[in-house]
Amino acid sequence: MATRPSRELETFANPRPGRAYEIRFDCPEFTCLCPKTGQPDFATIRIRYVPDERCVELKSLKLYLWSFRDEGAFHEDVTNRILDDLVAAVAPQRMTVEGDFWVRGGIHTVVEATHVKGDAR
């Protein structure tokens, strides 16, 4: 069976819901397309979160990130969209997504977006 990109994020029950602990993922092979030129943009996506009741399943996260490969997206938008989708899937106590994009046109871009449960922003 072939593995295909997917926007579906699978989750599982937090095995230690009574303890505040942090989970970190480094995803160094993220790619999307520049919406202006259509050229590939490469980045490391870093995800840090304190789970509440649910955790994200890693293979589904990999396929989710892969789904951006052929999509045009500004760095700021794609980083915030990843955060929004992960927050919707796992409702963490706290989560930060960082997009660390390779140099393009002499500019290195890092976008960091954070969600804190109960923060109305």
Image (cartoon, rainbow, N blue to C red):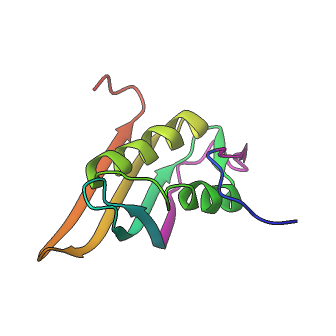
Q: Is residue 24 magenta?
A: yes
Residue 66 horizontal side relative to residue 47, left or right: right
Q: Residue furthest left?
A: 106
Q: Nearer the viewer, residue 11 or 9?
A: 9
Q: Nearer the viewer, residue 12 or 4?
A: 4
From the viewer's perspective, is residue 99 above or below residue 28? above
Relative image position of residue 12 (x, y in whole percent): 74, 46
Magenta residues, as a range?
8-27
From the viewer's perspective, is residue 56 above or below residue 119? below
Q: Nearer the viewer, residue 52 or 96?
A: 96
Q: Residue furthest top?
A: 120
Q: Is residue 57 magenta?
A: no
From the viewer's perspective, is residue 66 above or below residue 56? below
Magenta region, mostly helix, strand or loop?
Answer: loop
Q: Hey, which quadrant is residue 81 in on the image?
A: top left
Relative image position of residue 46 (x, y in whole percent): 41, 64
Q: Residue at x 35, y 44 (%)?
A: 80
Q: Nearer the viewer, residue 74 or 94?
A: 74
Q: Residue at x 51, y 40 (%)?
A: 85
